[in-house]
Image (cartoon, rainbow, N blue to C red):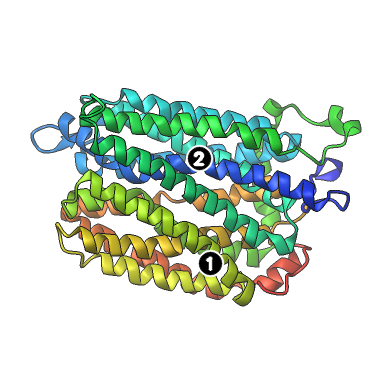
Amino acid sequence: MGTDTVRATPSADESAAERRREQRGWYMYDWACSVYSTSVLTVFLGPYLTEIAKSAADGDGYVRPLGIPISAGSFFAYAVSASVILSVFVMPLAGAAADRTGRKKPLLATAAYLGAAATAGMFFLDGDRYLLGGFLLIVANASLAVSMVLYNSYLPQIATPPERDAVSSRGWAFGYASGALVLVANLVLFLAHDSFGVSESTAVRICLASAGVWWGAFSLVPLRRLRDRGVPASQTSQLPQASQASARGWRQLASTVRDMRRHPHMLSFLLAYLVYNDGVQTVISQASVYGSEELGLGQSTLIVAVLLVQVLAVAGALAMGRLARKYGAKRTILGSLVAWTVTIGAGFFLPAGAPAWFFVLAAGIGLVLGGSQALSRSLFSHLVPAGKEAEYFSAYEISDRGMAWLGPLIFGLTYQLTGSYRDAIVSLVAFFVIGFVLLARVPVRRAIRDAGNPVPDRI
């Protein structure tokens, strides 16, 4: 990429104090946006949008957007799939524009505030407005995916190689702590909605919209502390404008893919991550639907369960970060995939109307959720060639979110064909088993050397 490339690691003249200040700002974007993933995608929107779709359904239980018959119980899962398919088209444009212009912050701000606005707009979901709900979900999810491309691409620039596992884990921990804090407020409002003079439906809509307000407000911190770097002033006039860079996005993506072919071991890691993370993302988005529709659990029970996930995910992310320092990130991730397989397989046998067992399942998910995601991100950061962070992280984000359409699609199709959410949830076990096998075959040390990066003592 010539003289306009960005640095892959912090420069030597950046002090540890300067690095820590920027890292703390970086953590705050996880603090800002994770509330959307927790309160909106995991807890409230799935059951609420499903009920709205059911109220709009015909006598056979189908809604018909664009004349296509869709089971009302599958509409949310299909909307999630549509959102991540859209993300596939948008994320490469953002990654290419960021690397070519060196202006990540304006792009991050655009994605963050578009997503926050769409989320805040969910306050207006009532009656039978399932199409509005699907549209806002698609916009918010795609915006989150784009913002995470840019956010993740800062990691190699703000942390030295030995720091990355810890920094990445702290970021996830901040996100889960934020989600837990807001869920407590949501739980108070939902359970005591009569005391606040609002209906249950209005309380849910306030919870949805407040996530958008939170996302937008706390995004100000990383936008103030993170720095665009790596484009010398003498080269600024030679760089393309952001609009031109976006127009070249697909050509740049093709170039990035060709470049990636020179790093087959990194591609092997991305394939493994694509598979097992598809299972993770589907569990996150569909667990509340499973709990409410199949197990007959109330909204308050689901909130408490997800709150338990958030609290344990903070401890799990930090604990797995420490395990990675002792055993290496790859081995720790493999261990987490075994735990995922056992936990989701056990979910098939949960008795209906038994909150205690659902809480046990939530605890198992929480202990491995944050760590498996945090360590995957930090491991990939070692595989990225210098100067190509945003472009390569756009490919990573496609694996993280943009390719996570298959799990929800299979979940929705399984339910539509069998009428059983139990069959739908157990179908996700295959993602973790296959992902384990693929990751176990990746020689990560060789992949790091091939990328021209220093190999940590433990990886």
**Residue 121: x and y, percent?**
39, 24
Q: Nearer the viewer, mark 2 or mark 1?
A: 1
Question: In this view, which residue lies farthest toward the left?
Answer: 59
The residue positioned 88% from the left and 32% from the top of the image is 233
The residue positioned 21% from the left and 24% from the top of the image is 127
User: Along the polypeptide, which appears first: circle 2 or circle 1?
Assistant: 2
The residue under label 1 is 319
The residue under label 2 is 33
Determine crowd level at label 1: few under 14, some 14-19, many 20+ residues with C-alpha closer than 10 A: some
* Dot 2 amino acid type: Cys
The residue positioned 45% from the left and 58% from the top of the image is 313
Element type at mark 1 = helix
In this rendered view, identify the residue nearer to me: 30 or 312. 312
**Residue 245: x and y, percent?**
70, 32
Calculate the distance from the C-alpha at mark 2 to the C-alpha at mark 1: 23 Å
Image side of residue 207 versus residue 247, left or right: left
Quadrant the C terminus occupies: bottom right
**Residue 235: x and y, percent?**
88, 33
